[in-house]
Amino acid sequence: MFLQQVFNGLTIGMTYALVAVGFSMVYGVLELANFANGAFYILAPYILFLMFSSMSWGLLPAIILAIIVTGVVGALMDHFILATIRKNKAPVSSSMVATLGVSTVITNGLIAIFGSDTKPIPSNVGIDSIHISTAILTGTQVLIIIAAVIIMVVLSLIVYKTKLGSAMRSIAQNGTAARMMGVNVNSIITITFFIGSACAAIAGAMTSMYYGSVDTMLYFSVSVKTFASVILGGIGSVPGAMLGGMLIGMLETFITGYVTSAYRDTISFMIIIVLLIVRPTGLLGQKKITKV
Amino acid sequence: MPLLQVTDLHVSYGAIKAVQGISFYLNEGEVVTLLGANGAGKSTTMNTIIGIVKASQGKIEFDGQDITGMPSHQIIKRGIALSPEGRQVFPRMSVTENLKMGAYTAKDSKVVVKGIQQAFDLFPILKERQNQLAGTLSGGEQQMLAVARALMTDPKLLILDEPSLGLAPIIVKDIFALITKISQMGITVLLVEQNARMALGVSDRGYVLETGKIVIEGRSDDLLVNPEVRNAYLGG
């Protein structure tokens, strides 16, 4: 029982961590809470459903297409909507409302096209289950854990070891100075949106495969959990988002397993409230260094 | 033909006219000072040259090309580097990472290696602090880092915006000695300062900016003895 809870918590935690990292990267470069991130998370499984079930594509090509399309939608949102808002020097809150608008368009568009009923998503990924004493790690769980670890390692390498990552961090620390160094700030932000949205897409696709279904209600629950993860880990911190996502997933699974499932989605809210009072910078968040 | 030619530049922030029709130029190899009190429009002019702020009217030509209204990343590629007012280092990056950011537009990794070597030669203290986060450096060290970062790509034109601001007098002396050294490396320097005596001491020519307009211009030696300049900027 305990080991099984660890496996389940780890799986869910990995998906939360992935969404939270994407959200955090965007937050880092713009200090913008991207409300459309949850919509990108559910957009991917619907594309997967359309390609796999209706057009009988293979699972892997369908997943790849879902990830790319979602990433592009995120990048386009930035390029056509948010970049214009930045150009007009409107406050970040305008961009935030715009992302809320985009998320509404996407979620309602999905309901209009696919209906509001639950859609089946294939969950057989062709990997054998692993039995460890009485606990089972299903093929989907194996895939989620391996894929999430690889992606998070790659993302960390991008952020901390590449020129693109340096550009992202420079914008996060001092956007004006980044421009003075010759960083093309707008295109770096658009690339960041692509990566962030693709992360949400990967997590969304994998979670829907894990549950075997998708519906638009997932939008709300994943949004809350993303906020909880980034606040727990420390807003804008990439390793913090990973840690926060993992902890939220674990906590949720254990409380559901050992106490009651009635409060599953409430746990995230409680974590947000307690942390904002006790430790607003989160576990790995940094206070801004302001030195003149 | 001058390396930098600014003609009838106007810059506004909404209804506020920060720069009202200024013209000046820099010949290759010169050190030119732009003097002026707080709010005279000095930093606005620098930020407009580098493309951070857009001009509402006028023309900026660099190295024979019109760069007015170009995005910053394209202007910087052409060989202008700015050490901004207030240092503006990346606080949560190490000294070395900050220097690498200075060479962001360089395609060749040899430029980065050479630039870092040059920075450490010019400022040995930065070598000692290379792995330290820039936000934890002292003000003087941050200023050195900002200058070193701007020098990373061997720019044709280096703009130094108030490099002496908020620094101890002994460090200010070092900074001005450094300007002469940079000039000897063959880099044209545009120096923006409030410290008129020091600035005119190291520069060939100077302009005095008041409320968005150039009111006096001339050779630095002449400006040092100009009664108006003496009264306003040199304490009589």
Image: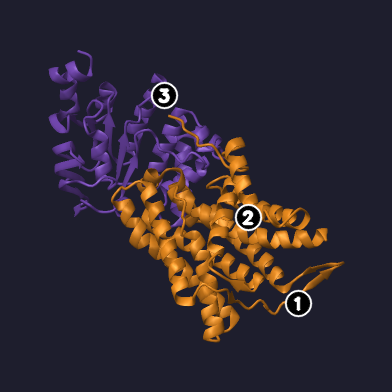
Chain colours: A orange, B purple
| Quadrant of the rendered image containing residue A218 | bottom right
Mark 1 sits on what residue?
A128
Whether marks 2 and 3 lie on the same chain: no
CA separation in Å, label 2 and label 3: 58 Å
Q: Secondary structure at mark 1?
A: loop
Residue kind at label 3, given as amino acid type: Ile
List x then y, in percent, for residue A164: 47, 57
> Disc 3 versus disc 1: distance between alpha carbons?
68 Å
Nearer to us in this view, A223 or A143: A223
Q: x, y percentage for residue A116?
A: 51, 72
The quadrant holding residue B174 is: top left
Q: Residue at x 28, y 34 (%)?
A: B191
Q: Are marks 3 and 1 on the same chain?
A: no
Question: Three-letter amino acid code at disc 2?
Answer: Asp
- Which residue is the extreme one toward the bottom? A56
Considering only vertical position in the picture, is A41 above or below A112?
Answer: above
Residue at left offset 52%, top offset 52% = A24
Quadrant in the picture for residue A101: bottom left
Whether residue B95 is visible to the viewer of this picture, yes or no, is: yes
Choose mark 2 or mark 1, whichever is in front: 2
The crowding category of the residue bearing disc 1, from other C-alpha atoms within 10 Å (few below 14, some 14 to 19, many at least 20), is few
Q: Residue at x 43, y 52 (%)?
A: B111
Q: Left or right of B177: which side holds A269?
A: right
Q: Is residue B188 left or right of residue A65?
A: left
Eye-nearest disc, 2 or 3 = 2
Q: Which residue is mark 3?
A: B171
Badge 2: few (under 14), some or many (20 or more) residues near its Cα, within 10 Å? some
Chain identifier of the residue bearing label 3 in the image: B
Drawn side of residue A67 relative to residue A142, left or right:
left
